[in-house]
C-alpha cells in the first residue's frame, strides 16, 4: 500500500460501525492497518509517540474511578460526565495537538456507549502509539 493511500484512511470511515463486529470481536484491521495508517498520519504532523501517550493518559484518568465496575461489567454505560470530559479532551488542542488525533476522537465518541467501547478506543490509541514508535525506529527513506 502506498503512503498516500495510508494517509487517506479516515477514522470517520473505519469507525462508522463502531469498534466491534457482529460477533463482538474488534473490527478487522482496527488495531492493524488502521492503527498503522493513523500512526503515519500523526508522524506526518510531526508528532511523537509521547503525544499519543498523553492522550491515552488523559483517557485513563477519566476512566480511573470506574475501572473496577467496568472490569466486572464492560457493558456498563459510560456516564455523561465522562463523555463530556472526552469531548473536552477532543476539543483541547493543547493536548491533542493533532488534526488526526482530533479526528479520531471525534469519530470515536459517538461509538462509545459503554466501557467496553471506551477501552477499545484506549487500546486503539495504544496500538497507534506502538506503530508510531516503530515508524520512528525505521531509517528515513529517500
Image (tube, grey):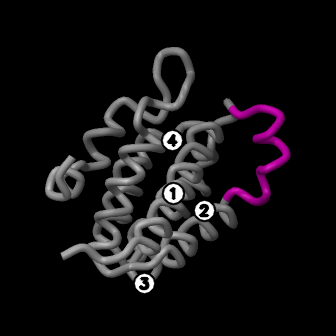
Give the residue at mark 3: 94
Q: Are marks 1 and 4 in contact (CB under 8 Å)?
A: no
Residue 14, x across and y down, in percent? 31, 39
SS for callout 3: helix
Q: Is residue 31 above or below residue 24?
A: below
Which residue was labeled with disc 1?
Answer: 125
Residue 112, disc: 4
Comparing 79 with 98, the one in front is: 98
Mark nearest the camera among 1 and 2 is: 1
Cβ–Cβ below 8 Å for labels 1 and 2?
yes
64 within the magenta span: yes
- Earlier sequence position, callout 4 versus callout 3: 3
Judging by the rendered image, the residue that carries numbered circle 2 is 59
Near mark 4 (Cα within 10 A), the count class, few <14, some 14-19 or many ≥20, is: some
Magenta residues, start to end = 63-74
Q: CA distance from mark 4 to mark 3?
A: 23 Å
Q: Which residue shows up at 38% across the image and 64% down it?
A: 101
Position of residue 138 measured from the top left corner of the image (x, y, whole percent): 41, 71
The local secondary structure at tag 1 comes to helix
> Which is closer to the viewer, label 1 or label 3?
1
Which circle's residue, 1 or 3, is located before the other in the chain? 3
Q: CA distance from mark 3 to mark 2?
A: 15 Å
As helix, strand or loop, the secondary structure at mark 4 comes to loop
* Residue appearing at x 44%, y 43% in the figure: 32
Specify the farthest residue to the top: 23
Amino acid at each position: 500500500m502506498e503512503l498516500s493511500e495510508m494517509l487517506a484512511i479516515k477514522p470517520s470511515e473505519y469507525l462508522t460501525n463502531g469498534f466491534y463486529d457482529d460477533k463482538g470481536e474488534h473490527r478487522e484491521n482496527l488495531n492493524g492497518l488502521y492503527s498503522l495508517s493513523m500512526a503515519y498520519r500523526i508522524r506526518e504532523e510531526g508528532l511523537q509517540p509521547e503525544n499519543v501517550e498523553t492522550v491515552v493518559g488523559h483517557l485513563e484518568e477519566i476512566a480511573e474511578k470506574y475501572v473496577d465496575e467496568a472490569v466486572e461489567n464492560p457493558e456498563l454505560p459510560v456516564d455523561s460526565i465522562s463523555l463530556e470530559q472526552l469531548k473536552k479532551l477532543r476539543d483541547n488542542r493543547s493536548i491533542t495537538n493533532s488534526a488526526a488525533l482530533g479526528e479520531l476522537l471525534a469519530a470515536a465518541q459517538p461509538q462509545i456507549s459503554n466501557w467496553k467501547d471506551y477501552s477499545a478506543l484506549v487500546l486503539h490509541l495504544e496500538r497507534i502509539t506502538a506503530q508510531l514508535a516503530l515508524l520512528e525506529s525505521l531509517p528515513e527513506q529517500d
